[in-house]
Amino acid sequence: MRKLDDIDSAFAALRPQTQALIILPSPMTWAQSPRLAKLAKERRLPAASMPDLFAESGGMLSYGPDFVSDNERCAMLVARVLRGVKVGDLPIERPAKFQLIINSRRLEHLA
């Protein structure tokens, strides 16, 4: 999706046999999480995406890195740089903590 109108046309293009959605992360899907959750709910489709905002906005579930934990880790790396550690000497890291949020109210509506 590249523009807001693409969201509506993507949902309009869903085949009748569509049973669920996985919404991949992008800047647009991130920013439009509440809208995407609403559209999925209106069509009674279970949907999953990455930002926690998606599940909090009515999507069925979200799964992804715990950004609070990641931000804390970034702050520790910045502190090391400020103490004189060379950036090239810092380790390359991946998220160490993930979070799964299941919207139980949404599950009840699908049953």
Image (cartoon, rainbow, N blue to C red):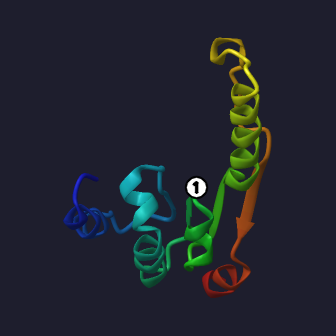
Relative to 57, is 95 on the left or the right? Answer: right
Q: Which residue is mark 1?
A: 50
Q: Amino acid at mark 1?
A: Met
Which residue corresponds to the image point at 41% horizontal and 59% vertical from the top-left?
A: 29
Which residue corresponds to the image point at 46% horizontal and 75% vertical from the top-left?
A: 34
- Quadrant occupied by the C terminus: bottom right
In the rendered image of this protein, does residue 37 appear above or below residue 31?
A: below
Which residue corresponds to the image point at 69% horizontal and 39% vertical from the top-left?
A: 74
Q: In the figure, residue 76 lies in which quadrant?
A: top right
Considering the numbered disc 1 on the image, is that residue within a helix, a strand or a loop? loop
Q: In the figure, residue 9 lies in which quadrant?
A: bottom left
Which residue corresponds to the image point at 40% horizontal and 67% vertical from the top-left?
A: 32
What is the x, y in percent for residue 18? 43, 63
What is the x, y in percent for residue 110? 61, 81
Residue placed furthest toward the front: 83
Relative to 51, is 67 on the left or the right? Answer: right
Q: Label 1 crowding class (10 Å Cα cut-off): few <14, some 14-19, many 20+? A: many
The front one of 9 and 27 is: 27
What is the x, y in percent for residue 10? 28, 62
In the rendered image of this protein, does residue 37 appear above or below residue 77?
A: below
What is the x, y in percent for residue 26? 42, 49
